[in-house]
């Protein structure tokens, strides 16, 4: 199985990238492709820009990476209760090529934050909207209080209950 994993965040210190990569490592039978959305930085989407310059080739490259995967893990950072601007822009450009951005791939959607909310607001929005974009969401999980529950030195969830929930969540991709 080829597993595409990424954080919907452009932060070089993204805790969601830590979570997405850790979650992918739990799928021991998978070939893991870790995508960095910083490699897909494009001008802000607008219909005027699209009409003047066309769609950037990076949007197609993003869709190609999804097409090459058998399954997808995305961990969402939350900015003011919503998607990060970087992810939303990438998604908007890609959806101009193919509105079925997720291409019917089985998906696990995750989110985390330093606080007790665990970015649950954006995760709920992502889970609810994914089917409109051909996302086959198998499971989702929010990890609250990241730094209290994840040891970045050992790359492990230290909270036993959350670790078990994540392991169960990842089995939905089999």
Image (cartoon, rainbow, N blue to C red):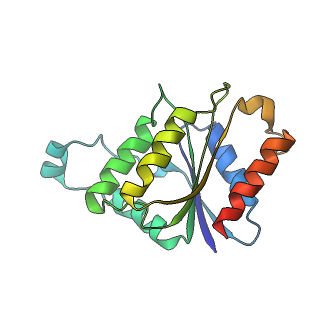
Q: Is residue 145 left or right of residue 71?
A: right
Q: Is residue 158 left or right of residue 85?
A: right
Q: Residue at x 61, y 66 (%)?
A: 3
Picture coordinates of residue 42, whole percent (x, y): 35, 46
> Which is nearer the eye, 94 or 104?
104
Quadrant location, the N terminus: bottom right
Q: Is residue 9 visible?
A: no
Image: 108 above or below 17? below
Q: Is residue 14 visible?
A: yes
Image: 142 above or below 36? above
Picture coordinates of residue 77, whole percent (x, y): 55, 37
Q: Residue at x 71, y 63 (%)?
A: 171
Q: Residue at x 79, y 29 (%)?
A: 148
Image: 37 above or below 149? below
Q: Residue at x 21, y 42 (%)?
A: 46
> Which is nearer the eye, 118 or 13?
118
Picture coordinates of residue 138, whole percent (x, y): 58, 60
Q: Is residue 95 left or right of residue 85?
A: left
Image: 158 above or below 31? above
Picture coordinates of residue 124, whole percent (x, y): 51, 40
How many discs appear? 0
Quadrant location, the C terminus: bottom right
């Amino acid at each position: 199985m080829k597993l595409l994993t990424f954080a919907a965040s452009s932060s070089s210190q993204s805790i969601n990238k830590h979570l997405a990569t850790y979650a992918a490592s739990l799928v021991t039978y998978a070939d893991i492709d870790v995508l960095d959305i910083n490699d897909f930085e494009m001008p802000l989407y607008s219909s005027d820009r699209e009409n003047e310059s066309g769609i950037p080739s990076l949007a197609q490259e993003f869709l190609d990476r999804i097409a090459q995967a058998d399954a997808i893990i995305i961990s969402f950072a939350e900015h003011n209760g919503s998607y990060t601007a970087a992810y939303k822009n990438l998604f908007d450009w890609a959806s101009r090529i193919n509105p079925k951005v997720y291409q019917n791939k089985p998906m696990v959607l995750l989110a985390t934050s330093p606080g007790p909310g665990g970015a649950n607001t954006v995760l709920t929005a992502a889970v609810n909207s994914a089917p409109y974009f051909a996302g086959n969401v198998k499971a989702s999980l929010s990890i609250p209080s990241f730094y209290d529950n994840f040891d970045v030195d050992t790359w492990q969830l230290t909270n036993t209950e959350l670790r078990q929930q994540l392991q169960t969540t990842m089995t939905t991709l089999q």
